[in-house]
Amino acid sequence: MTETNLLKTASTIFSDDETPFLSARRVAEHLGVSMTELAALTGMARNTLSTAAGTRKADAALSPIVRILTMAGEMAGGEQRAAIWFKHQPIPGWAGKTAYDLVAEGKSGKVLAYLEAVRSGVYA
């Protein structure tokens, strides 16, 4: 699946119909976490994440998570499996840390690089 198709898939799953921005509520529902937990994961204040005034900031904070979930969903065979992998499956080479842990530490780029490597056929 190309990057454009991934973004189209992500926009239909993780955004509300009335805005072009990602929906924090929908991302939280998909992950099975509260808005408070999602705010901690993104490093944003809960109110900023859930108000219309913070949509650009929220979109920027949610974008790496959505990219990870979309790519993992493509590889794992579904959105629910991707959410389970994101929260519970340790990533090799990161001392038992999950994608959730790494994103909370600000290392979403490392998770994306890992997924790209796996998708390219590199066993990690």
Image (cartoon, rainbow, N blue to C red):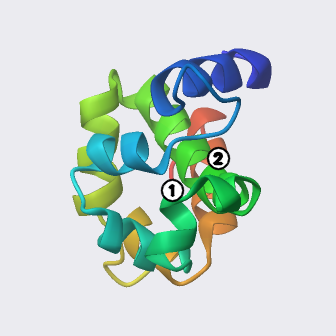
Mark found first going from the N terminus, 2 or 1: 2
Q: Amino acid at mark 2?
A: Ala
**In the rendered image, which residue does mark 1 sit on?**
124
For the residues labelled 2 and 1, the Cα–Cα distance comes to: 7 Å
Where's residue 120, x and y in %? Answer: 66, 34
**In the rendered image, which residue does mark 2 sit on?**
117
59 relative position to 51: left or right: right
User: Image quarter for residue 7?
Assistant: top right
Q: Is residue 96 above or below residue 114?
A: below
Residue in the picture at 31% in, 40% down: 30
83 relative position to 42: left or right: left
In depth, the one of 50 and 97 nearer the eye is 50
Where's residue 56, x and y in %? Answer: 76, 54
Residue in the picture at 66% in, 43% down: 116
Proximity of marks 2 and 1: CB atoms separated by less than 8 Å = yes
Numbered disc 1: secondary structure? loop
Q: Is residue 109 above or below residue 83?
A: below
Q: Amino acid at mark 1?
A: Ala
Categorize mark 1 by other alpha carbons within 10 Å: few (<14), some (14-19), many (20+).
Answer: few
Where's residue 3, x and y in %? Answer: 76, 25
33 relative position to 17: left or right: left
Residue in the picture at 34% in, 39% down: 82
